[in-house]
Image (cartoon, coloured by chain):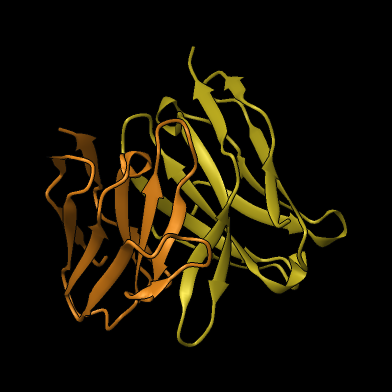
Chain colours: A yellow, B orange
Amino acid sequence: EVQLVQSGPEVKKPGESLKISCKGSGYNFTSDWIGWVRQVPGKGLEWMGIIYPGDSNTRYSPSFQGQVTISADKSFNTAYVQWGSLKASDTAIYYCTRTVATTFYYYMDVWGTGTTVTVSS
Amino acid sequence: DIQMTQSPSSLSASVGDRVTVTCRASLSISNYLNWYQQKPGRAPKLLIYSASNLQSGVPSRFSGSGSGTHFTLTISGLQPEDFATYYCQQSYKTLGLTFGGGTKVEIK
């Protein structure tokens, strides 16, 4: 079974750093893109960016460029998002997704369970 | 960014009803349009990709149509487990994937 297992909930203070993870299993982790999506409580979905674990090729949404760093370690079948200095507005649920990207198709077919990040003083 | 506008933002329907959700793109996106379902406290789930392709395992009462700027998601014969929020998402501009604002389908 294809699965993406995300790290547990985090409670942080403004200005702190954070790295959350997403571990893939049940498929060839290096052959599919992994994307990240943010959902502020009670709000809609926002695409943050994407990484190809095979070569760490990374692309960011303009809205998130410079705000987060997406990375991957193919030896551990794991992708990450990290923040250098959290803000209260980073409070949200963060989902990782397996993303199928071909010439004709581009969609997120497997989603992680989500990591809740709370930033509060 | 390509703006995606869903309508209605919410609707009430009964079990067995035919339900249609509309998504409009601010410019032509060919058929690069996906639909997702999200239930409270759960991750979204892919229903339809490339406008009209049913994802494996998704019931056939779900269907999608459209191209260019106008798309629809139809549920033919609403079931109790279909009460959820539905999102469209354009994948035409891959450096700026955007979602619609969501349509909440509630029980009448």
Q: Is residue A5 above or below residue A48?
A: above
Residue visible at 26% across and 49% down in the picture: B78
Residue visible at 24% across and 48% down in the picture: B101
User: Residue A43: image x %, image y %?
Assistant: 31, 36
Left-right relation of A45 to B20: right
Q: Is residue A68 visible?
A: yes
Q: Is residue B93 visible?
A: no
Q: Quadrant of residue B74?
A: bottom left
Judged from this view, the residue extending furthest toward the top is A121
Q: Quadrant of residue B24?
A: bottom left
Looking at this view, is B35 or A73 the one in front? B35
Q: Quadrant of residue B54?
A: bottom left
Residue visible at 45% across and 58% down in the picture: B46
The tally of labels here is 0
Left-right relation of B89 to A13: left
Q: Is residue B50 above or below residue A89?
A: below
Judged from this view, the residue extending furthest toward the front is B16
Left-right relation of B30 to A9: left
Looking at this view, is A14 or A19 the one in front? A19
Q: Is residue B93 above or below residue A61?
A: below
User: Residue B9: image x %, image y %?
Assistant: 15, 44
Query: Which quadrant is home to the N terminus of chain A?
Result: bottom right
User: Residue B31: image x %, image y %?
Assistant: 30, 80
Residue visible at 49% across and 35% down in the picture: A93
